[in-house]
Each structure stands twice: as C-alpha cells, then as structure tokens.
Amino acid sequence: MSDADKILDEVTGQDYKYGFVTDIDTDTIPKGLNEDIIRLISAKKNEPGWMTELRLKAYHHWLTMEMPKWAHLDIPEINYQDIIYYAAPRSKPKYQSMDEVDPELVATFDKLGIPLEEQMTLAGVAVDAVMDSVSVKTTYKDTLAELGIIFCSMSEAIAEHPELVQKYLGSVVPYSDNFFSALNMAVFSDGSFCYIPKGVRSPMELSTYFRINAAGTGQFERTLIVAEEGSYVSYLEGCTAPQRDENQLHAAVVEIVVLKDAEVKYSTVQNWYPGDKDGQGGVYNFVTKRGLCRGENSRLSWTQVETGSAITWKYPSTILAGDNSVGEFYSVALTNNCQQADTGTKMIHLGKNTRSRIVSKGISAGRSQNSYRGLVKVGRKASGARNYSQCDSLLIGDQCGAHTFPYIESDNPSAIIEHEATTSKISEDQLLYCNQRCISTEDAVGLIVNGYAKEVLNKLPMEFAIEAQKLLSISLEGSVG
Amino acid sequence: MLLEVKNLHCMVDGKPILKGIDLEVGEGEVHAIMGPNGSGKSTLASVIAGNPKYEVTEGEILYNGKDLLSMDIEERARAGIFLGFQYPVEIPGVSMANFMRMAVNARRAYLGEDPLSAAEFLRLMREKGAVVELDSKLTNRAVNEGFSGGEKKKNEIFQMAMLDPTLAILDETDSGLDIDALRIVATGVNKLKRPDNATVVITHYQRLLDYIIPDYVHVLYKGRIIHTGGKELALVLEEEGYDRIINEYNN
Amino acid sequence: MPRPLEEILSDLYLSNIDIIGEGIPAWVNALRSRALENFNLLSLPSAKDENYRHTDIRRLLDGEWETYFIPSGMNREINRAVPQSGYSIDVVNGFCTSNELTILDNGIVYGSLRTAMIQMGDIISRYYDKIADVESTATSALNTVFAQDGAFLYLPDGVEADKSFSLTFAYHSEDQAQMCFSRALVIAGKGAKANVVISSVSDGEGRFLIEHVRETYAGDGAEMKITEINSCGANAVTVAGNYLRQESDSRVDMVSLWLNGAATRVNAVTDLVGPDCESNLCGLYFANGSERVDVNMTVNHMVPECRSSELIKGVVSGEAVGAFTGRVYVAPDAQHTEAFQQSRNLQLSDTAKIYTEPQLEIYADDVKCSHGATVGQMDEEAVYYMRQRGIAEADAKRLQMFGFVNDVISKCPGEELCESLAVLAQSRIDEI
C-alpha cells in the first residue's frame, strides 16, 4: 500500500466525531402517517384550524405523488409508515435565562463546539436552537424586537403572527411543488420564522441549529424568511446529528421572500450523520429550499457547505422575478465513504437584467458519488439576463464518482449564459511538494481541499467559515487542516 | 559527516538512472553537481529528498549517521533536508502564509520548539522575505500560483530561509533566471550559509558559481560521478565543455 | 381505448414478416425477432422521459405513416447536398439503388447492405447490430426490426482508400406521409484509412419520418474522417441513432452538420473501447422557423488513456427549438482520460428556445475532463466596430455569424467540401 493509499484509507476510515445521544425524555407520537396523526400533530401544537386544514390538504396531495427518481442517487425504499413524525422534548421549555435550560442540552451544544452562552456574547449572534423539531430557546429576541424584527419558532409565528404566516407560508414553495414539500407541509413540527421590516438591517447574524435526536424520528422543519423593502439579514443554519444506526429522514423546506432593494444571505453548514464507513445508517436529507427575489434590485445569496448525510437531495433555488435582482449560489459538497449527494441550484431568471452566479465545488472521496445538478433558465421577458456558472470537481481516490449535470434553458435572445466545469484530483506533485516542506500527507490533503474550497468558504460569515474548514478536514482526515 | 551517499543505484519506471553514486558532504561545505542533460542530477536530488517515484535498488544514504532511505519525505524535510525544486508546483487556493506556517511549525515541533504565534510568524515572514527581496504581496497569494519563473525560484529560497535547513539541495535554481534574479537568489543562498549547514547546488551553468563559490565540483555522467575537483573545475568546464572529461572517463 | 403504439408497430412487422425478411439470411431475421422483443420491453420514450424532454418520440411516430417494404422512387435524380465525389453509394427511401457490391483491387467493398448481408455474412455478422445500442434504445431496436437495406462500406486491415466515399441517403415521396427505415454500416479494419461523406436529403410533396441507424467501426489504429450532412427538407422528421466504436490507437475526426429538417432527434454515441484512441467530434446545427433540433451526444470512455473532444455549435432563430445534451462518461479505471466538451449557442430571436445540458459522469480519479456551455448572441461591439469601418449592419451580422459557424465547417476534410458546405451554411444564415 503506498503512502497516499494509507492516508486515504485512514482518512476515509474516520468515524463520525459528533456521534452521541442526548438523554432527554422526549414526547413522541406513534409511528406512521395518516389523517389522525396529522390532526394530532396540529393539536399538540395548538394550531388554528386553517393550519390544520392546510396540513390535511398537503397530505392528500402527497398521497397522489411519487418519489422523484431522476437524481443520480441510489435511494433504498423508504417506508413512510415506519417513521415517527413528531418528537418534542418532554419538559417543554420556555426559559428566560441559561440557568433554566436542561444541563444535558447545554452539554450537547458544548460538545458540538457551539456553546450557547459563548455564541450569545460572541459576535452578537442570536441562536434559535431547534432540537428535535421544537424550538427550545430563542435568544436576543428582545434586542431584535426593538427593531421590529420577528425571529421566533414557526409554532410561535403561527400563534402570534398568523397574518404574516398565512400571507407567505407556501407562497414560494407550495405544498404541491414536490413529493417532499407536500410531506413537509403535512407534518412539519417546527422551524424558524424571520421577518425583517421595511428599511431595517439586522444588526446581528441570525442563527439556528437543527439537530435530530430521538431515534426513528423524521425531522421536518420549516423555515420562512421575509425581508421587506430595503431590509437586510444574514441567516445561518447549521446541522449536526448524533450517531444512529437506522436511517433517518430529513425533509425540510426553506422559503425566502425578498422584496424591493432587500438582501438576504442564507448560509448553511450541514453535517448530519453520514452513516458509518460501510454505509450503515445516516440521514436522508431531502430538502427544498427556494427564495423569491420578488422586488426590483433584490438580492439573495445561498452559501452551503455540505459534508454530512448519507444521501443529499438539495437544490437551493432562486426565482429572480424582480428586475435587476441578483441570485448567488456558493456551494461546497463533500462526500466520503458511501455517501451520495445530488445537489446544486436553480436560477430562474424572469425579470429584466437579472444576474446570477453559481460557484460549486464538489469533493468526492472513498466510495462516494457526488453530483452537481443545476438549472439556469431564462424566461421570455428576462432581457439582459446574465449567468455565470463554475462547477469544479475534485476526486480523492479512484473508487468515487464526480458528476456534473447542468441544465441550461434560454428563451430570450439577449441572455448571456456561461457554464464551465472541470474535474481534477489532488496531484502527486502537490503532495510531494508539501511533504518536502515538512507537511504530512494528511495535513496536505486538508490544506489543498480547503484551498480548493476557499472561494466558497470566503462567502461564509467568519465563525461559520472556521467551523466549515474544520468540518472539511474532519470529514476527510480526522485532524484540523 | 552530514551526508554520505554510498554506491547509490536507482531506477525510474524500470530504467536504471543512477549507477553507483558516492558522495560525502560535510558541515559548512558547498558542493556543486554539474553534468550534461540526462546525466541523473535531478534524480540524485529527488532520491535524497525521498520522491517515491524513484526506486533505490542498491546502496545507502546516511544523514547525520542515520539511515535516510528508511525515512518518509516529510521526516527528511523536518530533519533539515530542503529541496529547492526545479519546477515548483502550483497549489491553487492555498495561501503562502497558511502553507508556510504549517511547514515551519512542523519543523519546529520536530526540533522540540513551540509553534510560532501568528504575530511571531508574520514577523519571521517579513524578515526572511527581505533576504530574497520577495515582494510581500506574493506571500498573500496562493502557493506559486500565477508566479513568474523568477518569482517561483525566489519563493523557493524564501522558503529555505523560513525553514532554516541543515542540508539544502538546489535543483537548477538558476534555470530561467535573468541576471538580476540570479544575483538575488545567489545572495540569498550565501546569506543563509553557516558553518553548521551545507548546500548542494545542481546546475548546468558556471554562471551561478560566480556567485555561490563551491568547495567541490562534481561531474555527473550516465549516473556516476566521473570527476571531482575544486571550484576551478567549473571554469574549465565552462571553457571546454564536458567532452574531455567524458572522453578520459570512457578511456 | 386506442391500441398502444408498440402494439401497432409490432403488428406492422408481424403482418409483413415474409416480405421484410424475404431473401435475407436467417441470422439477420433472428436479430429482428430479438430486437422486437427488446422494443416491446422498452417501449417508446415520450417527453416524460428525462432524456427525451425536448422530443416526444411517441408523438412523432404516432401518426398516419405509410410504410413500404419494397423499393420506391428509384429512378429519380437525387438532389444532392454537396457535389458527388469519389466512390459513391446512393440509398433511396431505404433501398440501395444498385444491388451489386463493388469490390476494389485493394479489397475494399462497398454497396448495398442487403447484398452484403447475403454475400458477406461471415464479416457482417461480427458488426451488424453489435455497435448500435439495441438493448436500451427503443428507436434503434425498432430500426433493426424493420431495416431491409442501406449502405455498406468495408475497408480490410491496412488499406488506405485512394478516394473518398460518398454515402447519400435520399428520401422522396410524391404526396404520401411515409415512415422509412434506413441503415448504414461502415467498417474500417486495423490500420485502415478512409474519408467518408454521408449526406441525407429529401424532396417531394409528401412528408417523411426517417428512422435511421448508422454503425461505424474503427479497428485498431484505423484513421477515419467522417463528414455527416443532414440537409433534409421541411417535410422530413428524423430520428437517428449514430453509433461509433473505436478500438485502440484509432482516430476518428467527425463533423456533423444538421442544416435542415422539420424535426431532428439524434442519439450520437461513441464508445472508446481500446486504449489510446482519439475522437474529435464537431457539430453544427441550425434551427429556424418552427424547426426543432435535439442532439444527444454520448462519449463513453471505457478504458484508460483515451482522448475525446467535442465542439457543438447551435444557431437558433425564429420560433425554433435547439437542444443539446452532451454526456461524457468515464468508467471506473479509465484513468488518464482526457475529455473536453464545448457547447456554444447563438440565440437570435426572442421566440427561439435553447436548451443545453453538458454532463460529466466520472468514476475514475486521474482524469482531465471539462465542459463548457454558453448561450449568447452576436457581439454588439464587433458589429459596431465593423459598421464604423463602413460595413452595413446586416452584413456585419452575417459576417460574424458566418465566422461562428465556419469554425466547425472548416474542420471538414478537403477544400472543395468545405467550400460547398460554406455555401450551404451561408444560405441558411441568409434565411434568418
């Protein structure tokens, strides 16, 4: 076995570091899905009648749909009746201070390297921590409230801001959109709601951590962000899941509405449990994320670092409806061992002079399959639309696959669309050069991978970028690069 | 003795390249290795550095009396062997600062020293950058990416200064340099010279040896050192070429 | 309930089985039976299939098409796309105009595919239906079921042809809507060298559905230049499967031009099965008015050390639709593959639609692969520059457009051929 092989073997043999279970009593309902379960979820959450009706409508539509099969993924049969659709921590917490929070929970976040207190004081990040679907704690709410910013759990929003929720929920991702969005609308347990009023720039980055905890529970959170005219917000979403042997289903929906002159930055670091190195266990991450740049000069930027999940099916998309609106997508997707990812974006240009930019960096290692799938569509009326896409793939080892499937559809003669893709591997020469400069092969791989992903990592807020760098190195080699 | 190469044979892709090299390098010495194209000069440098492409079939190399061939390439580097590459590779996205900090701290860990703090490291970068008149902007760029030929070579000497090696092997560091760059590189090398380290310069041309004065000049031909002399040998070679020495050897 | 299309087509074969298979060796008819089974298993793709989103094959085939299983239109003058040169084979409505095979002194054989099946079964059976994908492509399986004749060219090992070959597929119908199956088999033995020009043309008042399959085999070290000119009239719909297999050290330079036709769907598949092959594929398509062109190219790198490059250009105007899907597949262990693909498109009207999907599917790590795609329009700066030098705007645009397409045309072998193709392209540009 050559040195490089040894390192790769070690690197790809790395076990998941965040594998631990929090011992909190959870309140679960029976397995399976039917009308009664949906009514039960709605009742447990004390939802108004219109919400229950919406869920049921979505459920009935879901029954008529089939799982999409076009992705370059090998998805085992999922028994939707074998999933627990609701789990909430039993001691429903509503804390005023950190002291009241279950110490187990605080410890969990500590192990994840996201001490809540530190995050609260550091950099002014407000954390809406979601554990098993119910929002546990929302911080900095008062500071935000003074500015008129609403940042709360989706359940609270349904109770306290029904007019906003009714106006925007499902307006970007209707339940009929796809199989998973229908399922999500039917059973979503909680999520985040964020509303930035006209002219307000959020003074801090808003952040939510999602975790899946109880065994056999699917996580179906729902996020809705509305940025009114001239407002700005940077929203961070991070996910880690503890180790479980059976596969867990995660089918989230994120909707973003961006009005005139407003700007939203949405950053994700996704590190759900990827399964062990033989492909046992791991999260199925089937997520629908879509933003609507509704107003003129609006701007939406997606940045994602995807290192986790056994299977990822995710295409954060932007509909550029307002004239001069701008959509951006920056992605690093790393797959190792037996992971599969089919991820990318859709940029739908509808307004005049709309611009979009896509930078995707795929990294495949082990026996994984990593696909970029992206659509750039320019509608009839989108004169002067412009897109630039760059999709790079990096292969580590000869057992993995890297694939690129861009779809370009142009209905307007003034559109300019450019797509470029390259595939490369870490060259022996680069490793040798690093070795000669005292750097071990393992460190060199981390260094080179981070260098390769830099253009995307630079788009993340500082604290997130550092965590993402760590994740890339951990996912690949077990030591910080 | 710092470096002892004994009866070294090696192959590349099944083809023998080195056929019995003997070479001793002591502390404080400067050796020049010259020879026609394809004689095995760069191969010798690569074998000492530990490039896995080259298969040693016979002989041994001792470094400070220890068996060098059993060591990994980065172990050798940390023990103080520096190879200035003829063609330094580009590493996109990896900044010089990150790269060097990792390298310097790995070397320091080997020597039992504490890692440098960010501030100390930056100070060291500035100080050593001055040795080769390296534009400080270059250290903010990715490793060798978009560097001109001359900048790449200066960057090699800069890294040598940062890592403070015991044995530096410079593989055709003069190729592709104009006279000013050559002077800067050579001055850099001379500034780094101490009684307790050694330099092996591999070159095609005498002109580098106008600036870096060797104690010994070796002529490598068809995988063997066929002639060794003092610094004056380089001048003789410049005038006569290799033919006479090769003819003598063949007879 | 209407009968399924597959059943109608199967019945069409079964009720004409005697006439279709008459005088043809049993091994060919056995292939038909097997292909029919496959066809029924596969069923015809519709727009619901991911790979056929831009062409609904079911709808194209589901019409009142007449099918003749005997030669027709034989005595008419063929309205050629480019002047005839070298050795030629003419195929009209799927049947070769001559039943004779021509055998040259150096062993080259060319002529009717049907006659070759009868007289050269031992050679043909090694290639016929072996290169085309009849296992997973329903339209190609259908062609095997029905094809009775076509063009055949065989170059023995080590032979270099002294002249080029011109294979012309002409389609003529006075007033009927005809479905016509045609076939070509081109075999270049080890080290053989050839220059082949393949064209298809149509005329007459009737409409045509052309169902074509071409199999090309390049043996070890063979060198082939292939120019393909599709210049059927507005009366023709084409569904084609063009298959190329390359053995080690072979080199194929192919230029494919899709100049006219009401609707065209092409599956062009290249399998590189021996190491050190080189495949250079260039293409150009025009779609104007209400035309549709849907080009689906696949290059399969099955073994290490092969090189492929693709450059496909499209000019789409009027209310036309142009679609290009280019898939590059690199098999596990196909190390040191170099595969490059470029898709360049000019969109000239706001009612035209362009879809381009370059795809990379890579299972080996030590490879150099890239693809690029652009959709754009004419360079306004350049037009402005030319106008400033006194060139009329329309001329400036034509010049620029010609420059865009000539990049592909100039890759065809021979000055004469390039010139005639340039004239054809220019006339297409002038229509826009």
Image (cartoon, rainbow, N blue to C red):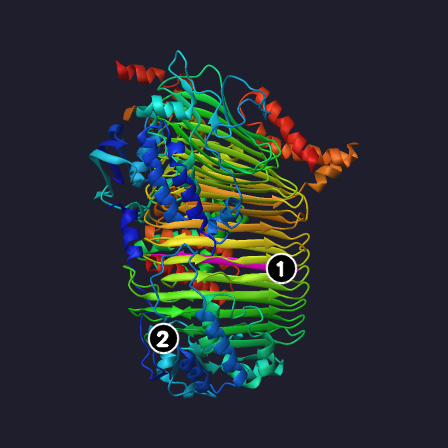
Most common secondary structure along the magenta stretch? strand
Q: Which residue is mark 1?
A: A326
- Callout 1: chain: A
| Residue A30: % across, % down | 34, 81
Q: Residue furthest left?
A: B58
In the image, taking residue B179 as reference, residue B229 lies left or right, namely left
Q: Which quarter of the rendering shows the N terminus of chain B? A: top left
Determine whether B203 is above or below C326 in the image.
Answer: above
- Callout 2: chain: A
The answer for how far apart the CA atoms under marks 1 and 2 are is 37 Å
Q: Is residue A177 something that shows in the picture? A: yes
On the same chain: label 1 and label 2? yes
Classify 10 Å Cα crowding around label 2: few (below 14), some (14-19), many (20 and above).
Answer: many
Determine whether A12 is above or below C252 in the image.
Answer: below
Q: Which residue is mark 2?
A: A217
What amino acid is found at the position of numbered circle 2 in the picture? Thr
Task: Determine whether the residue tagged by mark 2 lies in a helix, strand or loop.
Answer: loop
Residue located 42% across and 58% down the image: A69
Point out the stretch of residues depicted in magenta: A325-336
Q: Is residue C270 something that shows in the picture? A: no
| Residue C14: % across, % down | 38, 40
Task: Determine whether the residue tagged by mark 1 lies in a helix, strand or loop.
Answer: strand
Residue located 39% across and 82% down the image: A88
What amino acid is found at the position of numbered circle 1 in the picture? Val
Dot 1 or dot 2: first in sequence order is 2
Badge number at residue A109: none
Q: Residue furthest top?
A: C105
Q: Nearer the viewer, residue B32 or C30?
A: C30
